[in-house]
Image: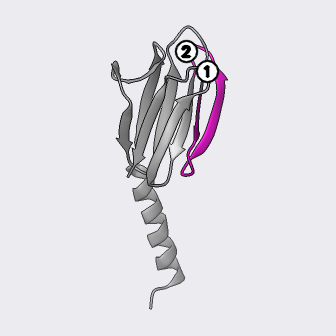
Amino acid sequence: MLSKKSVVAGLVMMFVLTNASAADHTIMQNSKSFKLAGSQIEEMTIKAGDTIHFKNEDPFFHNIFSLSDLKTFDLGSYPAGESKAVVFDAAGEVEVECAIHPQMYLLLTVE
């Protein structure tokens, strides 16, 4: 039989290992589109626990949001040079859009 101490230590180790593998990604908003490493993207796959930083590189405001059941969020309007982050903690698909520029669309697959 495992002791309480062993169980707690195991759970802490699982938590540390899970969070240690989480990655940070930066998606730029540029020319009214989502870009990664300078290239326009409409789809992206990430791991559960990853964080995406949405950085505004346009000279005008963006308002990034999702109404997806998996992850609902609204980052509000923010100006050029600012970045806002979202942690995607469950597997599935998330549709990301801009409330100001309806042509901006990104489908995130979270594994």
Q: CA distance from mark 2 to mark 1?
A: 17 Å
- Residue pictured at 49% horizontal, 65% vertical: 12
The residue carrying pointer 2 sits among few (fewer than 14), some (14 to 19) or many (20 or more) residues within 10 Å by Cα, namely few
Q: Is residue 39 left or right of residue 15?
A: left
Q: Position of residue 16 (x, y in %)?
A: 45, 57
Outermost residue, right side:
76
**Which residue range is magenta in the image?**
64-82
**Residue 81: image tag:** 2
Q: Quadrant of residue 31?
A: top left
* Amino acid type, mark 2: Gly
- Look at the picture and state if 13 lies above or below 69: below
- Residue pictured at 48% horizontal, 44% vertical: 94
Q: Quadrant of residue 13?
A: bottom left
Residue 23 in sight in this render? yes
* Amino acid type, mark 1: Ile
**Mark 2 / mark 1, whichever is N-terminal:** 2
The residue carrying pointer 1 sits among few (fewer than 14), some (14 to 19) or many (20 or more) residues within 10 Å by Cα, namely few
Q: Foreground mark, 2 or 1?
A: 1
- Residue pictured at 36% horizontal, 37% vertical: 44
- Look at the picture and state if 66 lies above or below 89: above
Q: Position of residue 110 (x, y in %)?
A: 41, 48
- The colouring scheme, among rainbow, by chain, secondary structure or one colour, is one colour
Q: Position of residue 18 (x, y in %)?
A: 42, 57
Residue 27 falls inside the magenta stretch:
no
Residue 74 falls inside the magenta stretch:
yes
**Residue where numbered disc 1 is placed:** 100
